[in-house]
Image (cartoon, helix red, strand yellow):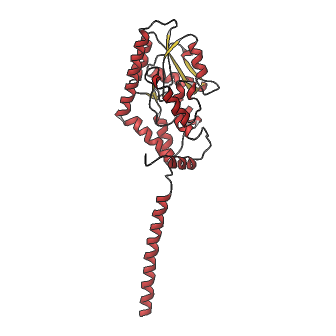
Amino acid sequence: MKNFKLIIASALFASVISCQTATQVSKNATQNTPYENLGRDGKLYAAFYQQRAAEYEALCLQAYNIGKLRLDEALAQKSEKPLAIVSDIDETFLDNSYYAVERSKMGKDYDQKTWEEWTSKGIAKPLTGSQEFYQYAASKGIQVFYVTNRVEQEREGTLKNLKKYNFPIQNDSNLILRSKESSKETRRKDIAKNYNIVLLLGDNLADFSAIFDKKSEAERSNAVKNSAEDFGKKFIIIPNVGYGDWEASFYNYKYDYTKQQKDSMMYNAVKANP
């Protein structure tokens, strides 16, 4: 009987030790495993900020207010050519964070097909202060050119969205979509042949100049510093933490990394110490 009790006690002790060991191994595995949803959940968190933060609204208002001041300064000067502004669309004055949320909740990222389905609806909301700014520019006789990397099949949905929120469309040709190259430099130069571009607005550095096109992170940083006087003067930038060349440059413009590879790269790149 004593031997039987000893066997039972030993078995119970071994079972407890086994459970404790398994739990500890599980904890260690969790602690040592890189965060696995940074790409997906990061975009969800970015959209949360864009949709909910009053500070984001303040940043938008600040940008448009500075833009209005620059327009007034330009209007006070003589110009041989008519004045124009060149503006991006997405996350520059239209909020597409709703698309990002939908994709994130499905565990998916951007793809062209679902993006075009989204833009065809023409329901993206305007950023705070944007309508007033663009309407002010048009009211002063300034031509507003929308230079975007949306493609031709998105024209109808884009015009629908602009009209829905009364963004000025002085001519249908003022909506300039991407045809071949993603760089906007050629399109900007074409506008500059007949207009004095006094202001450029965007959420991405490439919206302003070719010096930012397809550059590495270090090159982008240096180009920003070298162009310091242009920001707030000729370049008006709207914050976009959801996507952009800042993200693409981190991956060296390589678009075939898996989600797991991206998560691992981001996880290892962020620093816990200065």
Vertical relation: 241 (above or below) 208: below
Q: Nearer the viewer, residue 144 or 253?
A: 253
Q: Is 235 left, or right, of 69 in this rendering?
A: right
Q: Residue at x 38, y 32 (%)?
A: 56
Q: Residue at x 46, y 71 (%)?
A: 21
Residue 135 image position (x, y, % from top left): 42, 16
Residue 49 lies in quadrant:
top left
Vertical relation: 182 (above or below) 71: below
Residue 81 image position (x, y, % from top left): 52, 7
Question: Can residue 147 be seen by looking at this rendering?
Answer: yes
Residue 171 image position (x, y, % from top left): 53, 13
Q: Residue at x 54, y 41 (%)?
A: 109
Residue 198 image position (x, y, % from top left): 48, 15
Q: Nearer the viewer, residue 26 or 173?
A: 26
Q: Residue at x 58, y 37 (%)?
A: 111
Q: How many marks?
A: 0
Q: Quadrant of the N terminus?
A: bottom left
Question: Can residue 128 be seen by looking at this rendering?
Answer: no
Q: Quadrant of the C terminus?
A: top left
Residue projecting furthest to the right:
180
Q: Is 156 left, or right, of 41 in this rendering?
A: right
